[in-house]
Image (cartoon, coloured by chain):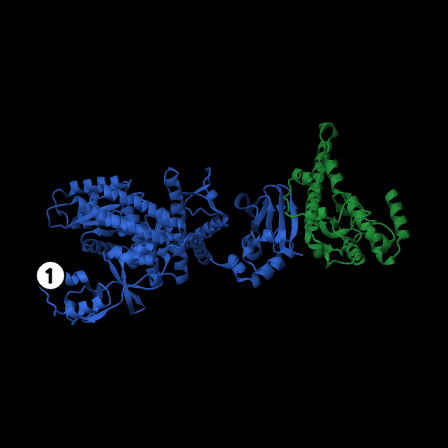
Chain colours: A green, B blue
Amino acid sequence: MWQRFYQAWLKKRLKDPEYGFLFEPPEDDAVVCFDCETTGLDPKRDSIISLSAIKIRGADILTSESLNLTFQPQQTVEGDSIVIHRLRNMDLSEGLAPQEAARRFLQFIGSRPLIGYYLEFDVAMVNRLIKPLLGIPLPNTQTDIAELYSDLFYQPWFQPEHEVFDLSFQGIRTRLELPGLGQHDAFNDALMTAMMYVKLRHLQETKHTSATRSSTT
Amino acid sequence: MADDDTLAYLNQVLPFDRLSDEQRAKAADALDVVYFPKDATIPLDRYESAYLYLVIKGRVSECHADDDTAQCGLYGVHAAFGAANLLDRNAQLTYHALEETVAYRLPFSVFEQLLQSSQAFEAFYFHDITQKLSQFHQQLQEESSSEAMMDAVSIAPLHALIEVDGETGLKTCVENMHSAQSDACVVHHQGQIGIVTSSDLLRGLALENFDLQSPVGELATFPVITIDQSDFLFNALLKMTRFGIDRLVVRDGQALRGILHQKELMSLFANQSGLVMLTLERAENLDDLKKVAGQIDQLVAGLSNKGVKTHYIAKLVNELHRKLQAKLWDLLDTEKRFDQVTYLVMGSEGRSEQVVRTDQDNAVIYPDDQPMDGLMAFCQQYNRKLIEIGFPPCPGNIMLSNPQWCLSEQQWRAQLDKWFEQPDQEGFMALAILFDAQVVKGDTAPLDRLKDDLWAQVRKRQMFLPHFALSVSQFDTPIGLFGRLITQKDAGHSIDIKKGGIFPIVHGIRCLALEQEIEPTNTHWRIRKLMDLNVFSEDFGIELGETLNFLNTLRLQSMLQKGAHGKTVDNRIETDELTHFQQDLLKEAFGVVNQFKKVIEQHFKLESY
């Protein structure tokens, strides 16, 4: 109810009618998983270096139709994040202008639900590009892997008090027994997040069916 | 966007490693990632789900659509599967995730384009077994350090070729040899080509009253033994051993090129094969011969590791074994009481196919008109010594120490008659073993006459061969209707490769060879002759030969491994220890065995028996 009201409110405030498709029903049953590599961790100050988005249909991760964008540098890449992403400033010189990148991203995702790991951060980063264009933030429904994961795995009565429930990317990947994919970049991170999503969805379903089965017997 | 990780992954997957960078990038761009929970069925057909899968994580089983319980293939990380369903209209395979599996998925359309754009890639899927097997050997050989044995004769240093007419005087001949610094000379004499060596010349001058003007033709040895320069050095050694000579004349087609001397040949090998030969030449007692037997075993292991074809190893080893047995005979028969006797090896030894000494099959033919006092006692002594050297006794007692296998020519003939008149399983086996016999020591004529007799017997008994051939299908080929391996339920999922594949080929070929009266006993040579006689096609003959060689290679490798670990050496191979590629080849090899069984059934019209 609240969601529908919020959507309607956003739609009314949409600056550019060309993007009305963001409020249409999705053209297929796919979801989109995406990840950004950024110059730092402050959404207000830092900017996106590269972005990868991958469609997921059922249990299939459509890497062959993935979107991979590199951005024009807005500011100098700080030393720390170079070490993480191995992207130097000179690698970025051929990137896209922010507006063009935002347009391609919106075309790619359409009105499909979005998936990500600590998605809030990535959405905040993208919103900075999108708001000048649309006047509104991303209206798509969002699912955070970390939330999905803790819904399934966090058992408060079982958690030792002195231990923090491990919600790190690496921790989730290891617990879900998914293969690592070598280098840390937007594409690999998006792909691993997609794998997590597919596996978590599968676990959710089996949990659900076993629950209904036990309730009927 | 083909990222580096995907490209690096593809580079580790057969046959994507054979693609060019550009083609690989194209494949990488088309990949999707798919997830299958444990026990999920992986969709794969030629319509909706026309995909090739490449495993990133997990294990996938391959089964036949009609029988889900029997697994016929297993795919792990870096393995690609699905091509069979995509390329072979008759294939009906189903795939299940044995554990949770993540895989790349390549659309058939892109797979097809890759097949068209890369020959090496296409070859992986479409080459028939012959080509795959020869690639397998090539690979083995590439992995090994360069082995002189497999080089061509043309790389060996040759002595200058001197050719003289048979009428030439000895003096001129020696002058020619001296100026060319050679110790041998080719002699053309009365339309024949022979050879004369410096020791021949010395013998002639010093011992046989030749003088410096005598024509050289009378001293020369005819015919000269030659070898083509494109032949393996290995075969040069084989020829020298077989004829007991030190020199071979090298030819290029029909033209003579030079003389290859054993000294130079040995220096090229600089390994055990030369050493074995020399120890054998110089052996003076039983201990020396035991040493030789041990060296032969090391030689086998060495050559096998180097990827020399088992067929060649077998030829060399059997040549050495025969020399060794002949030497033993000489050592024991010091007074040369039994020079008139013909000593035969039979069965696998007769066919030159025994590489690891598993048993001995041998016999003796002695002349009818000569008193042979003490021969039986001698044979028993010989047999004991042979066992002592390391030739295990024959479990069926088919040995010269058994009076039934130590007979005069007349007695042999009577024995043959008996085997043919009252055919039973034992008689069939005896005939099969005898038909593969070859002479190791003594006159070869008695055995030739015996084989003539054997053929005559076969010719006049139309019913014999079909009955004889029945045992080709005695054991089931360990492969299911749709190409999965049928293994024992033991720890290593073993297969008796002799019963399953080697025996049917060897015996089937033996039946055809009996029918066509083919003299060579080695199965590969028999196949060659059968091809020449158009009994079957050139292609099928080559395929059959390569298949036999592959099966023998697997058997040898397993025997060597078992021997090294002190286990009982038998004919079982553990399929779990084979690579995926070897398992595939094995399946195809058994396919050829089944095809051959059908050929034999049709040829001898076995359906009616």
Residue B385 as seen in the image, left or right of residue B12: left
Is B256 placed above or below B43 here? below
Q: Residue at position x 41%, y 61% from top?
A: B539
Q: Position of residue A4 (x, y in %)?
A: 87, 46
Q: Is residue B24 something that shows in the picture?
A: yes
- Residue type beneath disc 1: Ala
Q: Position of residue B467 (x, y in %)?
A: 32, 50
Q: Residue at position x 85%, y 58% from top?
A: A18
Q: Residue at position x 27%, y 57% from top?
A: B262
Residue B313 as seen in the image, left or right of residue B4: left
Q: Position of residue B25 (x, y in %)?
A: 62, 58
At mark 1, the secondary structure is helix
The residue that label 1 is drawn on is B206
Towards the viewer: B61 or A32: A32
Q: Position of residue A153 (x, y in %)?
A: 71, 35
Residue B589 as seen in the image, left or right of residue B394: right
